[in-house]
Image: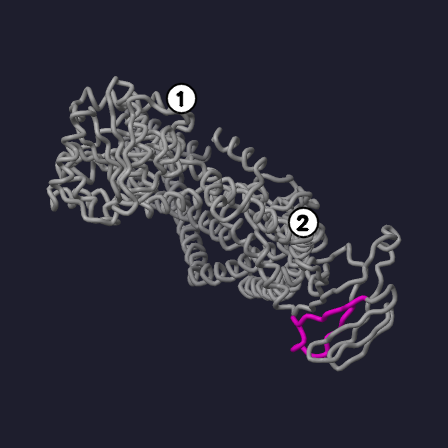
């Protein structure tokens, strides 16, 4: 079997059931449209809010950064949860009435009314158990109505006048604006009012509310609300966006106000502590005569260092004076040989005296060269030297005393100044502690004062850096149900369902549809496939070709007895036997057609026209002869030997003897005719023979040793239109006028 034949085999049930598929698809589409026409559409509106973001917003936003809500990637999710929280949704109900819902009840659907309501119900529930209960209102005229309260008899009312009961106080106010705009609006009919509890209203809103962010890094939120009323969807997203911003401003003001009050208290406390620190430092300085410990300490240390330097200089001078005194005492007799150090005596008087001593000693030496030591001139010089030495020694002594006095005074002063440093670390520690407390209190005070200024600015600035960048608009088209999608899905499901049903029925019927079924189920060869031919010309050509093929393949060897048998009636054995006989005649053969069923009248030229009601030929065919068994003999037992003798006699006259045998299950003589035949053509009908019957034919062949049995498939690859089958069924149970009948037959013949 070629690939094309395999594909056609798979598509045949689909092509045959195409009318069913079309009918089911049309029914499904009609049902989907009916559903869409009677279901309540849902409308969706969306508003967009940009969150405050100091990193990507106006420069002035930084002024309030400590009291504003940052909208970074970590807080966008928080803002989403805040926006769809019950607390915020409950706030929106204070701005928009969504607790009282009015419906108009129609024959098929119940429609919610909003701005298009002809009247507005104002209901005050007296007991919470009546919340979420329907109140049925029937408007009987333009002024009167009746209302059915839960578990209460109907009450009559007039528009604009209150109705008082133990369930609720009710008043219905006409929508004069709407009635003026639409004077032809008829609001007489049946209505239903439900006053939802606050909890149920919140849950209902949250169930239809969707808050999403554009992206995790983009601080823009989308507010989406779905409602059967488009105006209601748009109103609610706008109210929620405004409520969110107002709530933000309110919370920001409250936070700033609380912060200001807190900072005032803290500033007062820290101010008192700062004053105490300042007083403590002042008292400590006064008590210790402290101006600046560091500077004073540095000054005293500098003075002590200078005095110690002076004391060291005096000490060196004293040592130098002692040395000088010793030199002078040793070198009194010869001062020129001593060469004392006069670093300590650099004044002009000492210099003159040294010069005078040297002069006198030089003069004495000169005199001693002339005079003796006892000479008056020498003595006079000695006296002068004694006077000078005496004065000089006395001067050294006085200088030494003066140095010693200065040394003692400076040493005493140093000791007194060093007493200042006794307890200095403790003073520094205490001063450091006091100054540290003062510094901490001062910094805290300055910080709190700065924050108070910012908080006061934030409290005064009642604005928000969140802003609505897109308001919700009234949607023109519903988002659900999606008409195109539902109709398309209905059509697709109808196609899939009907196709599955067609193939399921096809599999359950399990007919011998083509040669592959026979080849898979039986080893008996299939020698011919008879196609359905409605036109006589095509039928003759087809059977002529079949006859030639059978002869070329040596299926029929002349003279031959060929039996045509089937499992049941009307499987085509008469049709095939008669037309194949004509095909053999076309090969210049003489054929005898034997009818053992006794169902066809014995009239020349008529038998070919009426075998099993199938149109075969309207005119006699030469070399084709017909033999019919007697009507009375069809139930008689046929003797195989007698039948064989009869057939041998006919073989002398005819080239081929075609036996139109009875079905296998109807007559006992069927097997006798099959036993004497040279070729047994077992006819299977693709539209009537079950696939499991093929195996039964093999069993019959093996059990009764049927000789040379072959299969012939009638109506091979034939899939009649559903209309054709319906016509065949209708003909059995209905009578049609001739004109209509001919028209239908002509139309179906084209199919």
> Residue at label 2?
464
195 sits left or right of 625 in the view = right
Per the model, the C-alpha gap separating discs 1 and 2 is: 93 Å
The segment highlighted magenta reads 122-139
- Is residue 463 among the parts visible in the rendering? no
Q: Report x, y in % for residue 231.
A: 72, 50
Residue plotted at (43% across, 52% down): 410
Position of the N terminus, as image quadrant, is top left
Tag 2 or tag 1, which sits nearer the N-term?
2
Q: In this figure, what is the number of numbered marks?
A: 2
Q: Is residue 693 above or below residue 658?
A: below
Q: Is residue 380 magenta?
A: no
> Residue at label 1?
537
- Is residue 129 among the parts visible in the rendering? yes
The 10 Å Cα crowd at callout 1, few under 14, some 14 to 19, many 20 or more, is few
Please tell me whether mark 1 sits on a helix, a strand or a loop. Answer: helix
Rendered image quadrant of residue 267: bottom right
Q: Report x, y in % for residue 155.
A: 79, 77
467 sits left or right of 690 in the view = right
Q: Report x, y in % for residue 555.
A: 17, 26
Rendered image quadrant of residue 603: top left
């Amino acid at each position: 079997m070629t690939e094309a034949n395999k594909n056609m085999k798979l598509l045949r049930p689909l092509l045959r059931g195409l009318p069913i598929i079309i009918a089911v698809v049309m029914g499904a589409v009609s049902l989907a449209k009916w559903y869409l026409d009677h279901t309540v559409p849902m409308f969706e509106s969306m508003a967009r809010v940009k969150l405050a973001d100091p990193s990507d917003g106006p420069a002035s936003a930084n002024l309030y950064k400590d009291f504003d809500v940052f909208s970074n990637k970590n807080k966008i999710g928080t803002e989403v949860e805040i926006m769809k929280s019950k607390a915020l949704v409950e706030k929106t109900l204070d701005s928009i009435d969504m607790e009282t819902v009015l419906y108009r009840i129609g024959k098929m659907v119940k429609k919610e009314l909003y701005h298009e309501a002809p009247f507005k119900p104002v209901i005050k529930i007296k007991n919470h158990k009546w919340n979420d209960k329907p109140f049925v209102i029937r408007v009987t005229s333009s002024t009167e109505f009746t209302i059915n309260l839960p578990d209460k008899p109907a009450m009559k009312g007039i528009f604009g006048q209150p109705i008082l009961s133990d369930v609720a106080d009710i008043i219905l106010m006409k929508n004069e604006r709407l009635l003026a705009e639409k004077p032809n609006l008829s609001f007489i009919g049946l209505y239903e009012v439900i006053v939802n509890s606050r909890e149920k209203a919140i849950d209902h809103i949250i169930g239809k509310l969707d808050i999403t962010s554009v992206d995790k890094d983009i601080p823009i939120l989308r507010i989406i609300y779905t409602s059967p009323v488009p105006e209601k969807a748009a109103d609610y997203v706008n109210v929620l966006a405004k409520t969110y911003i107002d709530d933000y401003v309110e919370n920001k003001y409250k936070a700033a106000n609380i912060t200001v009050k807190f900072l005032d208290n803290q500033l007062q406390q820290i101010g008192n502590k700062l004053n105490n620190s300042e007083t403590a430092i002042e008292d400590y300085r006064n008590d210790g005569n402290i101006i600046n410990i560091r500077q004073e300490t540095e000054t005293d240390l500098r003075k002590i260092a200078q005095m110690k330097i002076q004391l060291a200089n005096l000490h060196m001078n004293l040592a130098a004076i002692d040395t000088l005194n010793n030199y002078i005492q040793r070198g009194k007799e010869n001062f020129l040989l001593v060469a004392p150090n006069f670093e300590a005596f650099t004044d002009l008087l000492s210099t003159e005296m040294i010069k005078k001593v040297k002069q006198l000693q030089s003069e004495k030496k000169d005199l001693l060269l002339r005079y003796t030591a006892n000479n008056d001139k020498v003595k006079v010089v000695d006296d002068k030297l004694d006077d000078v030495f005496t004065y000089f020694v006395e001067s050294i002594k006085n200088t030494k005393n003066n140095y010693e006095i200065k040394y003692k005074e400076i040493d005493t002063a140093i000791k007194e100044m060093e007493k200042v440093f006794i307890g200095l670390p403790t003073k520094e520690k205490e001063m450091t502690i006091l100054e540290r407390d003062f510094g901490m209190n001062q910094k805290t005070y300055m910080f709190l004062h700065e924050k108070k200024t910012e908080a006061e600015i934030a409290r005064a600035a009642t604005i928000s850096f969140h802003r609505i960048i897109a308001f919700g608009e009234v949607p023109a088209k519903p988002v659900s149900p999606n008409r195109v999608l539902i109709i398309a899905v209905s059509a697709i499901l109808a196609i899939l369902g009907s196709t599955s049903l067609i193939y399921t029925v096809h599999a359950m019927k399990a007919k011998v549809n083509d040669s592959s079924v026979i080849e898979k189920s039986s080893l008996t060869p299939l020698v011919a496939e008879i196609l359905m031919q409605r036109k006589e010309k095509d039928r003759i050509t087809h059977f002529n070709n079949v006859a030639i093929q059978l002869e070329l393949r040596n299926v029929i060897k002349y003279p031959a007895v060929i039996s045509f048998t089937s499992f049941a009636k009307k499987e085509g054995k008469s049709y095939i036997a008669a037309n194949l006989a004509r095909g053999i005649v076309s090969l210049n053969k003489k054929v005898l057609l034997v009818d053992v069923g006794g169902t066809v009248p014995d009239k020349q030229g008529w038998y070919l026209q009426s075998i099993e009601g199938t149109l075969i030929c309207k005119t006699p065919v030469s070399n084709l002869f017909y033999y019919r068994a007697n009507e009375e003999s069809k139930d008689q037992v046929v003797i195989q030997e007698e039948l064989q003798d009869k057939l041998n006699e006919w073989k002398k006259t005819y080239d081929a003897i075609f036996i139109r045998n009875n079905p296998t299950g109807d007559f006992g003589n069927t097997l006798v005719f099959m036993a004497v035949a040279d070729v047994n053509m077992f006819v299977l009908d693709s539209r009537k023979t079950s696939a499991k019957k093929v195996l039964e034919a093999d069993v019959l062949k093996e059990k009764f040793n049927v000789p040379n049995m072959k299969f012939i498939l009638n109506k091979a690859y034939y899939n009649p239109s559903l209309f054709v089958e319906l016509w065949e069924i209708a003909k059995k149970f209905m009578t049609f006028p001739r004109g209509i009948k001919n028209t239908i037959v002509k139309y179906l013949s084209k199919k």
